[in-house]
Amino acid sequence: MSVPATPGRRAQHELAGAGERLRRLLAVLAYLARVGEASIAELAERFGLDERVLVGELELAACCGLPPYTPDQLLELVVDDERVVAHGLDVLRRPPRLTPDEGFAVAAAARALLAVPGSDPAGPLASALAKLEAALGEDRLDVELDSPEHLGALRDAVEERALVEVDYLGSRPGGETTRVVEPHRVVALEGRFYCDAYCHLAGGWRRFQLDRVEALRRAGGTFERRPVPPELEGPHAFTGGDSATLALVALPEGRRVLLDRVAAGPVERSDDGRVVVPVRVGDEHFLGRLLLRLGPDAEVLHPPSLAGARASVAAAALRRYGARPVTPDR
């Protein structure tokens, strides 16, 4: 079939991550489950996709289904020159029914979210959890989250706009510092607690991991609220900071997922088939440790000054362990 391409939309789709593509495809399938059939042009316009890309995604979805993936277990999507007809998508049209084990897992996740300080105990999540627990039976699920030692004191300082002095452990050995900060908020992201604060030592915004706060003291005085910068508003805990260097890291497509949570912008493709991921780097030591985890196929394309970050971190590790005897595996 011949489908006209829209370069802007197609390029945007190619830069989208696998997770985003899957969410968009599920949205398309859910819509088809409701309407039964639709034109390719309508679907492309509704979901912001290039028509050629949309057809490719639907053809891929038609190869998906349930084990053992025989023809009677695959999604039935008929794609012709102009329209898409969907059969057998009723499961996407009806509310899902959970098994007891699945219901328990959802309840555990919801209870953990509500245990985070600052959650609304009377909000929609709490209401949904109450209904789920009623359906599961009499047993009530209790979830306790480990709270860092200084969590309560920092939350009080946020409320009172109080300056605090913290002894903070950096990410590298010997990186301990004492700082005066303006704590603006405490957030829970990716299983840890963080404090977003304006740091007087750094002269800018920083996100501090509360597990690394060794000591906390009131510094005397208060501060005026500042607008939180956009780089601290993302869904991930990692942020390179407002003074970070933007590094371009090239690596194989299959290892791209390891950089998704620290990517600072859209991913591009290099001439040799690898993907190029922009990462905001606060210091060379962080980048070196990241490159060691990514493996030897990852390299820094820009700036040249950070190209040796992996070697520097590896050399420092060898110096620390060089004096220790090595026992061969038997």
Image: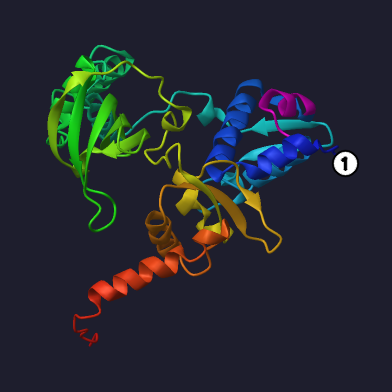
Residue occupying the point 72% across, 27% down? 43
**Residue 330 x/y as whole percent:** 22, 88
Magenta stretch in the rendered image? 41-49
Residue occupying the point 24% across, 24% down? 114
In this view, which residue lies farthest toward the top?
Answer: 122
**97 magenta-colored:** no
**Residue 48 x/y as whole percent:** 69, 28
Report the front residue among 307 and 52. 307
Query: Label 1 amino acid?
Result: Ser
Which structural element holds mark 1? loop
**Residue 129 x/y as whole percent:** 26, 21
Snapshot quadrant of residue 177: top left
Q: Look at the magenta stretch and give its main secondary structure.
A: helix
Q: Which residue is mark 1?
A: 2
Seen in the picture, residue 19 relative to 328 is either above or below; the reply is above
Snapshot quadrant of residue 243: top left
**43 magenta-colored:** yes
Seen in the picture, residue 127 relative to 230 is either above or below; the reply is above
Seen in the picture, residue 176 relative to 227 is either above or below; the reply is below
Q: Residues within 10 Å of mark 1 (few under 14, many from 20)?
A: few
Report the front residue among 227 and 108. 227
Compared across the picture, whether 295 is left or right of 5 comes to left
**Residue 295 x/y as whole percent:** 46, 67
Position of the N terminus by quadrant: top right
Seen in the picture, residue 206 relative to 67 is either above or below; the reply is above
Q: How are the residues colored?
A: rainbow
Figure label count: 1
Residue occupying the point 78% across, 40% down? 52
Residue 62 seen from this side: no
Residue 317 seen from this side: yes
Snapshot quadrant of residue 149: top left
Compared across the picture, whether 132 is left or right of 18 comes to left
